[in-house]
Amino acid sequence: MNNRYLKEEFEKNIPDRIKTALKFCAEAADEKALPIFLIGGIVRDIIISKKNFDVDITVQGNAVEFAYFLQDKYPGICRVKETHDCFGTAKILFDINSESIALDLASTRKEYYPYSSSLPVIEETGCNLYEDVIRRDFTINSMALSLNKDSFYLLVDYLGGYDDLKKGILEILHSESFIDDPTRIIRGLKFSVRFGYNFGDKTRRLMIECLNSGRFDNLGGERVKLELKQAFNINRAGCLSKFINENIYRLVDTEIPVPENIHDLAHITQNTVKDYCNFLHNPDKTWLIYMGVLLAGEAQRKIGYIAEKMYLSGQEENILQGAAALCKKQEILDKSQTRFEVYEFFERSETESILVFFIKNTNLKDKVDLYLNELKNIKISIDGNTLIKIGLNPGPVFGEILKKVLKAKINKEITSPDQEMEFAKNLINPNDRLDKNEL
Ligand code: ATP
Ligand code: MG
């Protein structure tokens, strides 16, 4: 391993406030004679000049004890936010120029997988950096950058990550890596989409073998969800194409029907997310649009099964179920004549569900746009209190009247608040009046 120092890259790509926090850590580590490194994604991103504020630090020793040492050494500047003794990790916060800098500290650790797709078991903490590095996913994520004074900026690259990064190749670290943890396949998908990198030949072959083996019964759905979310939230057509064409979808469910025109579908999805971003208030849910597109033809039960397996929240499942339900009754929208029929079709659907419907039914764009741009926002100015004021007894009829007023407004039969009131009055059955004499 030839010595490569990343001084220039570090100085250029790490913001000053983070540099200051790192220098505090390095000083403390030197005092304790602890080897300390930046590790993983941040080292990769320093080399390729990508912004990354996820600062992962590993110490060859006990990171929890080190975190408390930092807190004691820099009172008022550094505090321990949380610790996980069983993992040997801690989160610390530095207060630098009134800004809070979060750093994740981890003890170096050696791990093993008792069976395929299991969670790793920690065998040793405070081990050699090398042991910590070889438990990682790809060579490009297995580099460390020394922070100790006598070797500051030194890149520790046991596995050739630097060269792979420069070549844009994703290589796993050993032939059992995907079997140990198949979510690495989805992580690879994320990196290939984010950076435009490709799997190396051997890694690709091992991925195919793993996906064909079907050995992922023990795979935790919440881990799959976490990785899928990160991969699809990037919003790239290539993510969906690869997910299907490379059979990665099998990690979610082996029986997802493969759409025929996946290339087109993937591009329509990417463009839809982009074009309608103003309607999407939470970009974190983008991945559900992609999942929705894949599951739109599935039965409610099947979607429920997948949602349970992946630990989806109620709202996340609603988006998928809602999208499939809309797609199944597509004919109703196709035949709709009035603005209110369009409104009723989409009423109460999540925007993500509506966009899945649109992706599968682009011929109905005008109606989707009409709903999202206009109908969705139409509100009436009268409410239950207004109806009581004009003498109606509270009851189920309230909802009916208000809906009829809304319908008239959406269909542009009435426009002003006065007209709404007049319209409501005309609808009222005299028997529902509180005081008939007032009529
Ligand atoms: P991102 O930029 O998306 O955060 P990252 O590489 O920093 O990417 P993290 O999920 O933050 O990824 O994980 C930090 C590091 O932990 C990775 O760089 C990798 O070294 C290691 N790692 C994460 N997940 C796994 C995994 N499933 N198997 C092995 N190593 C992993
Ligand atoms: Mg990260």
Image (tube, rainbow, N blue to C red):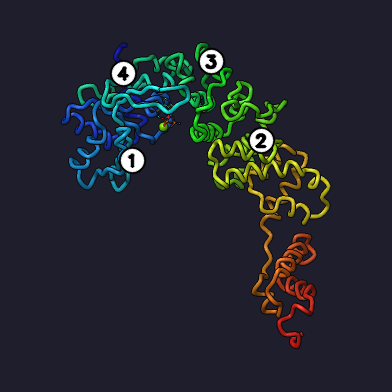
Q: CA distance from mark 2 to mark 3?
A: 26 Å
Which residue is identified by label 2? 295
Mark 3, Cα crowd under 10 Å, few <14 / some 14-19 / many 20+, is: some
- Residue 256 left/right relative to 148: right
Lower sequence index among marks 4 and 1? 1
- Identify the mark at residue 256; answer none if there is no mark: none
First reached walking from the N terminus: tag 4 or tag 3? 4
SS under mark 1 = strand
Callout 1, which amino acid? Ala
**Cα distance between the residues tagged 1 and 2:** 38 Å
In three-dimensional space, the C-alpha distance between marks 4 and 2, rounded to whole angstroms, equals 43 Å
Q: Which residue is mark 4?
A: 130
Contact flag, marks 1 and 2 (Cβ < 8 Å): no
Q: Nearer the viewer, mark 4 or mark 1?
A: 4
Tell me, yes or no, if residue 17 can be seen here.
no
Tag 4 near tag 3, CB within 8 Å: no
Q: Are marks 4 and 2 in contact (CB under 8 Å)?
A: no
